[in-house]
Each structure stands twice: as structure tokens, then as C-alpha cells.
Image (spheres, rainbow, N blue to C red):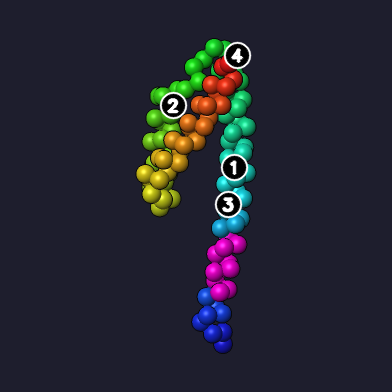
Amino acid sequence: MTDPATRAAELLKEHRESIDRLDAILVYTLGERFKHTQSVGKLKAEHDLPPSDPAREAKQIARLEELAVQADLDPEFAKKFLNFIIQEVIKHHEQHQK
């Protein structure tokens, strides 16, 4: 029989390994997302389109909030996270406009 402290340490290790895998997934997913948004920025610049699309951004934020609720994630956190990403994307798009 395993003592409680040893079992707790094993569980902690398992959780941390899962967190590390999920962090890697997040980083690679964000990398892939930014590759696509970079392409969008180039297209917008080539066709003289504005770097920001407020209607799409609002739609995406609403969609993400709904997904967050389904995933049992704080929708306000999800909204802040997406807003941060959107602002980074807009900065990149503005750089393509120059």
C-alpha cells in the first residue's frame, strides 16, 4: 500500500505532465493560427483592406464565449484571451499595410 504523501506526489507529477503536454499543444496551435493570420494580413494589404474587421471580431468573441461555457471555462477569461490575440493579429496586419 502506497502512503498518502507518495501517492500525492505521483498524482502531482501526472497532472504536471498533462499540463506540460497541453502547454505544448497551445504553443503549436497558436503558431499555426498566427501563420494563417499572417497570410490574411498579407492578403488584406495586397487588396487594400483594413487591418481590423470589428464585425468578425465581435462574432468570434461571442463564438469563443459560447465554446468556453461548453468547455466549462470562464467565458470572461476566454474573451480576454481572444481579445489579446486579436490585438496582436491587428498589429501584425498593420505592419503589412506599411
Image spot of residue 91 (x, y percent): 52, 27
Mark before the other along the chain sequence, 4 or 2 = 4
Tell me if residue 63 can be seen: no
Mark before the other along the chain sequence, 2 or 3 = 3
Could you say whether the residue bearing mark 2 is in a helix, strand or loop? helix
Query: Where on the picture, by quarter, is residue 65?
Result: top left
Mark before the other along the chain sequence, 3 or 1 = 3
Q: CA distance from mark 1 to mark 2?
A: 20 Å
In the picture, measured across the screen, residue 60 lies left or right of residue 43, that is left
Image spot of residue 23 (x, y percent): 58, 51
Amino acid type, residue under disc 3 in the picture: Asp
Q: CA distance from mark 3 to mark 4?
A: 35 Å
Residue identifier under label 3: 23
If the image is split into quadrants, where does the N terminus sit? bottom right
Q: Is residue 66 magenta?
A: no
Label drawn at residue 29: 1
Q: Residues within 10 Å of mark 2 (few under 14, many from 20)?
A: few
Amino acid type, residue under disc 2 in the picture: Arg
Q: CA distance from mark 4 to mark 1?
A: 26 Å
Amino acid type, residue under disc 4 in the picture: Glu
Residue identifier under label 4: 46
Q: CA distance from mark 4 to mark 2?
A: 20 Å
Mark before the other along the chain sequence, 1 or 2 = 1
- Picture layout, residue 47 above or below residue 12: above
Q: CA distance from mark 2 to mark 3?
A: 27 Å
- Picture layout, residue 74 above or below residue 35: below
In this view, the residue in front, 73 or 70, is 73
Choose mark 3 or mark 1, whichever is in front.
3
Q: Residue at x 61, y 25 (%)?
A: 39
Q: Residue at x 56, y 74 (%)?
A: 9
Magenta extent? 9-18
